[in-house]
Image: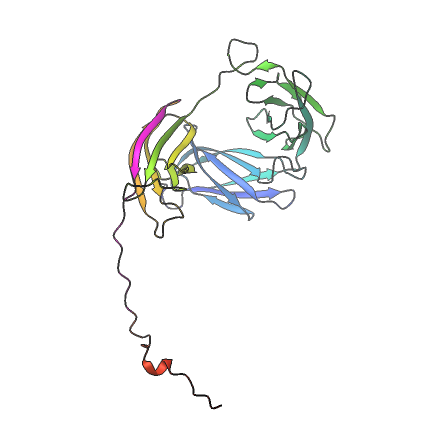
Amino acid sequence: MSPAPAGTGIALRLVRARPCVARVRWWAPDGRLAGDKRVHDATALVTVPAGTWLLDVADDRSSHDPSRLAPARLEVQVRDGWRTAAQAHLLPGAVLTGSVRTAQDTRARWAEVEASGPDGTLVRTRTDGLGVFTLAGLGAGTDVLVSARSRWHQATPVLARPTRPAGPRLVLRLAQPLLGASRPGGTDPVVGGALRGVVLDADGERASYAAVVELRDARGSLLARTRTDREGRFVVGGDLPAAAGLTVVVKSGPGDVVVDRVHLRGLAVGAGQLVDLGTVRMTRAARRPRPQRASLPRATAAALRLPSTRV
């Protein structure tokens, strides 16, 4: 996508029911997430090329905070060379509370709970140690589809209407296996791609412990980050879609005095594919000698002379 000409973009104005930090995400006409930013002020400039853009504006508070505002979704048509004005209203949000239970009627701890609105907005959270959840910042007066899942099981989605304050508690039961799309309500898990390798120091004699491994796309945006273990091994990604033109940046760990970097460019990964990069050896960059500071006084024998003491 070509860069936006000067002056082309969206002048966004935020109308908030109460002060908050907003998270703005914008989606390209092809459905790709093009960027996101946090907005503290009442106005923000989104620099994008001409086209039809979809903006999601949400309160950046935690999804279980009852004071969280409801999100807003805008569709803005941007003309070439024009700055289009748009306004997003963040109204007081409604709340849903409930609990997730297993098929044996025990607490489902740390289960994923998701509420999807009719406009496609999503609010996600997890249950606590007692299997209880709170979904805040939902649109009031409209039904949302609430679903829950654990590692191996899922609950039948239910329709619920959020209220202010929270209404009756929902009870979701993880009674269906997650695997198998042929089962009622079942879905096949989506397995993403990942890359692995082993990092050695510049001498190639020892593993580089706690080295930083970053995965970036063709535009330089950070996709994933991890650190190597004591054997220098790493696995980065795990939820990546099929992509090409990736770059892996390896930085030496805190045990090295000077930080060295290695760039592995032109990588590709497929959905569900584990790409082995083999051994990555750190390259010791040339060090510039420190300039001598002639302004510092030199030590002399007179400077070490101690005052005499008479007894």
Q: Residue furthest bottom?
A: 310
Residue 47 position, x and y percent, is: 42, 42
Please tell me whether the stretch drawn in magenta is mainly helix, strand or loop.
loop
Nearer the observer, 1 or 273: 273
Quadrant that contains the N terminus:
top left
Residue 102 position, x and y percent, is: 65, 19
Q: Residue at x 62, y 43 (%)?
A: 16
Q: Is residue 195 left or right of residue 15?
A: left
Magenta stretch bounds? 272-292
Q: Is residue 253 above or below residue 52?
A: below
Q: Is residue 152 above or below residue 38?
A: above
Q: Is residue 21 above or below residue 126?
A: below
Residue 284 lies in the magenta stretch: yes
Nearer the observer, 109 or 1: 109
Residue 218 visible in the shown view: no
Residue 282 lies in the magenta stretch: yes
Q: Is residue 211 left or right of residue 106?
A: left
Q: Is residue 121 above or below residue 10?
A: above
Q: Residue furthest front?
A: 311
Nearer the observer, 148 or 141: 148
Nearer the observer, 110 or 122: 110
Q: Residue at x 74, y 28 (%)?
A: 167
Q: Residue at x 65, y 44 (%)?
A: 18
Residue 277 visible in the shown view: yes
Q: Residue at x 41, y 83 (%)?
A: 306
The image quarter containing residue 297 is: bottom left
Residue 127 position, x and y percent, is: 63, 29
The image quarter containing residue 246 is: top left
Q: Is residue 103 left or right of residue 219?
A: right
Residue 124 position, x and y percent, is: 58, 30
